Amino acid sequence: MAQAGQTPRRAATEARILDAALDVFSAHGFRGATLDGIAAAAGMSKPNLLYYFATKEEMHVALLDGLMDTWLGPLEALNPAGDPLDELRGYIRRKLAMARAYPRESRLFANEIVQGAPRIAPMLSGRLRALVSEKGAVIRQWSAQGRLAPVDPVHLLFAIWATTQHYADFDAQVRAVLGGDDPARFEDAQKTLEALFVDGLRPRA
């Protein structure tokens, strides 16, 4: 993979290859993806592909590394100084927006996790765990202050991840059950999830 100082032409070619690799990985997973398939998707020969990336693992790691800041951004934006219900509402909306805008990236991440996270395990036990601990402490404090109903913050986050990412990772199932590409599905999902999580966590008398 090119280092800092690469030419614009090389950068553009690598971006094209990674976009093609994202298509292939998100559709077939790491094990099902092949260099031949990625080369075909990128519109180039396999030897030409190998000039830029020596292995499919190198491409896979590059995609995952590039995804992490985007993936963690919605949780990092949870503001301790904000209104708890507004902050949770915003977090749900940001996660749904990501599912809508980045379905391939979501499936890439999901496939990696299903395979045991062999390439991103250090990130999960390091950066992600630290972020969940930090934001979990915020949610726990909101509950202690009576600003949220009592809730286990980690399992709350797990539930939000599962329900929002469902619309990307299980898109085919969603479309099948809804009977097509319903343009309102994300708006309807947002209302439902806010009713579950936000209304369900309003402070109790």
Image (cartoon, rainbow, N blue to C red):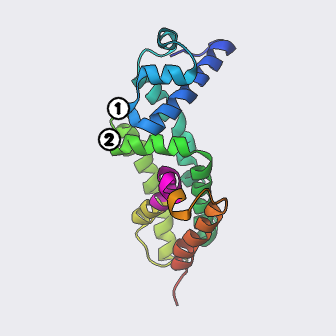
Label 1 sits on a secondary structure element that is helix
Q: Magenta residues? A: 161-174
**Could you tell whether 88 is left or right of 150 in the image?**
right
Q: Nearer the viewer, residue 72 or 34?
A: 34
Q: Position of residue 188 (x, y in %)?
A: 62, 68
Picture quadrant where residue 124 is located: top left
Q: Most prominent secondary structure in the magenta stretch?
A: helix
Residue at 44 percent across and 64 percent down: it is: 159
Q: Residue 73 or 63: which is nearer the viewer?
A: 63
Q: Which mark is residue 115?
A: 2
Dot 1 and dot 2 residues touching (CB under 8 Å): yes
Residue 194 percent location from the top left of the image: 58, 71
Q: Residue at x 68, y 15 (%)?
A: 8
Check the image and name the residue furthest to the bottom.
205
Q: Which residue is mark 1?
A: 31
- Place of residue 174 in the rendered image (x, y in percent of width and height, measured from the top left): 51, 59
Quadrant hosting residue 133 = bottom left
Q: Label 2: how many residues lie within 10 Å, few (<14), some (14-19) or many (20+)?
A: few
Residue 65 visible to an observer of this rendering: no
Question: Which amino acid does the dot numbered 2 rest on?
Answer: Gln
